[in-house]
Image (spheres, helix red, strand yellow):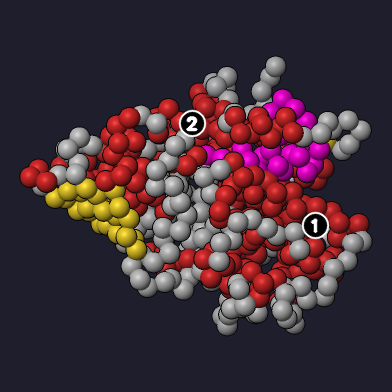
């Protein structure tokens, strides 16, 4: 059986017996985390600029997003929500495929809720299916896909979004296979756009393309029989390294969300900065260090880990989210790294700009074979104060990973912080009750009814 057909059969099969209560519980936590950062990101000026470019929705089928007073055409809803979900770079990560798995999949599914009247379980199942296809496709290609310059969230996300939408819409195996063929030709996104608005727009484009692929296939548009293998999508996006699934890679056994799980972010920036931040904050706390007096700082990382850290001298908040030096300098100066750390005016402080040049970043020469190799590799930060001493800390576990996870309390605090930014009119009791219901998403009869409680009342 071809890879495409294996995927199509997996996507189109109902998952009542395959998806366990534990997997759905993990999915509910990821859903809450993604929704929180989407709400917070919606008020970003970048999203307003995108909305201004969209065509009116008059006469078209439209959908509502709960954090916006507007209704959108289906494609435009994906674009706006996708950018909102990723503009803060606060959404979850899977180092198996070096990507953000939840945002393209959930962004594609939100517009289907009104039409399908989906229950919590139906949404969670579609999400689990979509992220599984996304992650395992990236795992099959290995780190080579990312190293070539592709933004894996965009490329893999298109396929994952299509898979999730096909499952939610109940497409049979034949039409699902055609949707995968369509999605394969719509995959796009390059890392060169990291640190710009386009990086977050990639999520909206992937979700929109995935949803359209499912719609096209449902309407009868047909693609090639084997678009992924036999000199197809896998070979093209791996630079010729891969043309099939590795032995032993079986969909849903276990699900990627279950083992090794997704990493949920503690800090609103590129995940490759998180160990740097954690090491620096540890040194500051344990030794009472400050930015003043720092003569030199060195960051030691594994091969390939610094690829997304493209802005050593950031001049705005978006650049700073992809800056190894800023991770050290900002952490030392403020003793924290949160949403306020990535405002333009925070990054442009004279003390920050003056100190960036003393931070250097070094990589080992060994290139990783898989994204998981990057995620598990230690990061060491060394701070040199001259006669004031030399201090070093190494972080092994990725913050937010299974080895150092966000607790339910951590997730609640992140939820509160994000909703306070995006929906300040909601009362504290409402915010906490929505979180409690979200954790029990598997039991919700209507996701739309739950989401409607977020809706601004104007």
Locate residue 211 relative to residue 88 in the image: left or right. right
Q: Residue 426 lies in magenta, yes or no?
A: no
Outermost residue, left direction?
387
Identify the residue under disc 2: 416
Q: Which residue is pictured at 22% across the width and 52% down the height?
A: 382
If the image is split into quadrants, where does the N terminus sit? bottom right
Determine crowd level at label 1: few under 14, some 14-19, many 20+ residues with C-alpha closer than 10 A. Answer: many
Residue 267, given in percent of the width and then of the height, sits at: 42, 42
Identify the residue under disc 1: 213
Separation (CA) of disc 2 from disc 1: 35 Å
Determine crowd level at label 2: few under 14, some 14-19, many 20+ residues with C-alpha closer than 10 A. Answer: some
Outermost residue, top direction?
458
Q: Which residues are magenta?
A: 63-88
Q: What kind of element bears circle 1?
A: helix
**Residue 178, image quadrant:** bottom right
Q: Which residue is pictured at 59% across the width and 47% down the height?
A: 199
Locate residue 132 relative to residue 62 in the image: left or right. left
Which numbered disc covers residue 233? none
Q: Is residue 167 above or below residue 409?
A: below
Q: Is residue 200 above or below residue 238?
A: above
Q: What kind of element bears circle 2?
A: helix
If the image is split into quadrants, where does the C terminus sit? top right
Q: Which residue is pictured at 74% across the width and 55% down the height?
A: 210
**Residue 8, image quadrant:** bottom right
**Residue 65, image quadrant:** top right
Residue 86, given in percent of the width and then of the height, sits at: 57, 43
Locate residue 246 relative to residue 159 in the image: left or right. left
Between 103 and 425, the residue placed more toward the observer is 103
Residue 157, given in percent of the width and then of the height, sits at: 65, 57
């Amino acid at each position: 059986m071809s890879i495409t057909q294996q995927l199509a059969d997996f996507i189109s099969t109902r998952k009542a017996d395959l998806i366990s209560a534990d997997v759905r519980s993990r999915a509910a936590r990821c859903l809450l985390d993604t929704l929180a950062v989407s709400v917070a990101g919606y008020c970003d000026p970048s999203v307003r600029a995108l909305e201004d470019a969209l065509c009116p929705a008059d006469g078209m089928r439209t959908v509502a997003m709960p954090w916006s007073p507007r209704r959108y055409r289906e494609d435009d809803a994906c674009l706006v929500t996708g950018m909102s979900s990723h503009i803060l770079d606060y959404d979850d990560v899977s180092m198996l495929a070096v990507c953000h798995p939840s945002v393209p999949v959930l962004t594609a599914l939100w517009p289907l809720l009104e039409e399908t009247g989906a229950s919590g379980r139906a949404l969670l199942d579609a999400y689990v299916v979509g992220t599984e296809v996304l992650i395992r496709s990236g795992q099959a290609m290995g780190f080579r896909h990312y190293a070539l310059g592709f933004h894996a969230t965009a490329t893999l996300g298109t396929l994952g979004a299509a898979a999730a939408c096909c499952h939610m819409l109940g497409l049979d195996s034949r039409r699902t296979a055609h949707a995968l063929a369509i999605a394969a030709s719509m995959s796009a996104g390059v890392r060169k756009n990291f640190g710009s608005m386009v990086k977050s727009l990639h999520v909206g484009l992937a979700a929109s393309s995935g949803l359209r692929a499912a719609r096209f296939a449902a309407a009868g548009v047909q693609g090639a029989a084997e678009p992924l293998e036999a000199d197809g999508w896998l070979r093209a996006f791996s630079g010729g390294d891969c043309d099939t699934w590795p032995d032993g890679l079986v969909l849903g056994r276990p699900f990627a969300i279950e083992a090794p799980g997704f990493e949920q972010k503690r800090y609103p920036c590129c995940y490759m900065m998180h160990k740097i931040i954690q090491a620096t904050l540890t040194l500051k706390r344990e030794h009472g260090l400050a930015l003043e007096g720092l003569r030199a700082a060195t960051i030691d990382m594994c091969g390939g880990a610094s690829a997304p850290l493209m802005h050593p001298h950031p001049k705005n908040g978006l650049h700073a989210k992809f800056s190894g030096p800023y991770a050290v300098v900002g952490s030392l100066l403020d003793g924290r790294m949160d949403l306020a750390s990535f405002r333009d005016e925070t990054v442009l402080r004279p003390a920050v700009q003056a100190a960036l040049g003393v931070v250097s970043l070094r990589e080992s020469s060994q290139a990783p074979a898989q994204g998981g190799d990057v995620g598990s590799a230690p990061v060491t930060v060394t701070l040199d104060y001259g006669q004031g001493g030399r201090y070093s800390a190494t972080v092994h576990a990725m913050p937010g990973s299974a080895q150092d996870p966000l607790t339910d309390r951590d997730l609640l605090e992140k939820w509160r912080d994000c909703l306070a930014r995006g929906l300040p009119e909601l009362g504290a009791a409402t915010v906490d009750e929505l979180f409690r219901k979200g954790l029990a998403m598997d039991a919700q009869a209507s996701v739309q009814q739950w989401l409607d409680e977020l809706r601004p009342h104007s």
